[in-house]
Image (cartoon, helix red, strand yellow):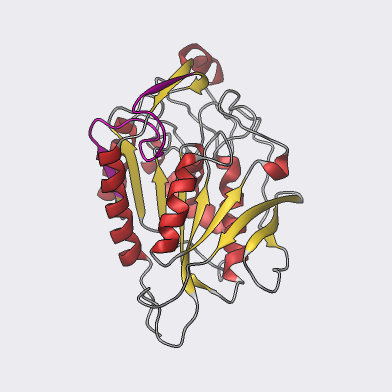
Amino acid sequence: MLAGAMAAVLVAGCTSGTARPTAPAALPLPSDGAGVQSFTIDDGVTLSGELAFPAGNADRGVPEGNTAVGAVVLMHGCSGLPTRSVSVWQPLLLSWGYATFVVDSFGGRGLRGVCGNALRLTGAERIPDAYGALALLARHPRIDPARVALMGFSHGGIATLGAASTWARQRFSPLDGPAFRAFFPFYPYCNAIVPEMAQGIAAPVRLHIGELDDWNPARSCVALGELARSLGYDFKVTVYPGARHGFDAVGLPPRIFLRNVDNAAACTPRLASMMGPILNLFELASCMTKGATVGHDAGATELAREHVHDDLADLLAPISR
């Protein structure tokens, strides 16, 4: 069963499961439609994001006479914004002709980071953030609502992976509402057992992870991809040889050890539901450790850019009407 490998929730997000996110309600957009935008989720929590547009539509795959462009929603990691991965991908995506919306999941919640205290906010609790951003973009006259992808990194990659589930699509977006066209989780945690994943995957997934990732192990993501494909889902996992967690974060040294982050690489959390609680919490307490290795890998970064460029061109291609 696909649920047996799905990592929609960071193991250390051991919440009581009381959170019951509601369908997002986007606030009115300013007239120019760019810059900081706000949207409301989950019992009135208001979040924000930075919306940017490419310079023009020429040679961008936009049909003549149509000014709407495809877009990529970006989800930061456990350290919040600014973050290196988002900072390097955002201008690149703009140069390829896509609008970008960088979601700030922490500011509206009064958080700065959760790397060392993952109990504070789980990846799954950020799934409504992604769908709130989608609802906002779908109302924007310069965005093609049928051409929006979700991309997230580490903690944001967990949210992206969870958002890719059919359960999340049905839970956080109306039946006749917008849907993400594709999902791009970067080095997410793939060890958790989440029952809702038995419902399947809502759209193509392109997962990217380093072979030497000692924070979120690649082997679990590979197993997840194999299982998903055996069930007929479009789910591709690319493992970058010799690369570590955060391999695409240009500016990081090749190897640096973060001493104070929560690490559940050796654990297999079992969840009662996507939003928790974790059933084997006491077991996890004995296998969790502190510390993980991150590092930039120029070769893996270049390959990942090529893969994402080609996949976006394919998966976000304009739909003929």
**In the figure, is residue 207 to the left or right of 103?**
left
Relative image position of residue 110 (x, y in whole percent)? 73, 37
Q: Residue furthest top?
A: 286
Relative image position of residue 109 (x, y in whole percent)? 71, 41
Magenta segment's dominant SS is loop
Relative image position of residue 85 (x, y in whole percent)? 45, 42
Start-end of magenta stretch: 236-258
Image quarter for residue 243? top left
Relative image position of residue 158 (x, y in whole percent)? 48, 40
Residue 253 magenta: yes
The quadrant of the rendering that contains the N terminus is: top left
> Foreground residue, 254 or 172?
254
> Foreground residue, 250 or 37?
250
> Foreground residue, 182 or 245?
245
The quadrant of the rendering that contains the C terminus is: bottom left
**In the figure, is residue 115 to the left or right of 24?**
left
Figure disc tally: 0
Image quarter for residue 81? top right
Q: Look at the picture and state if 196 lies above or below 95.
A: above
Q: Look at the picture and state if 290 lies above or below 63.
A: above
Q: Residue furthest left?
A: 241
Q: Residue furthest right?
A: 44
Image quarter for residue 98? bottom left
> Foreground residue, 264 or 223?
264
Residue 242 magenta: yes
**In the figure, is residue 38 to the left or right of 301?**
right
Name the residue: 58% across, 66% down: 137
Name the residue: 51% across, 44% down: 159
Name the residue: 47% across, 40% down: 84
Name the residue: 61% across, 32% down: 113
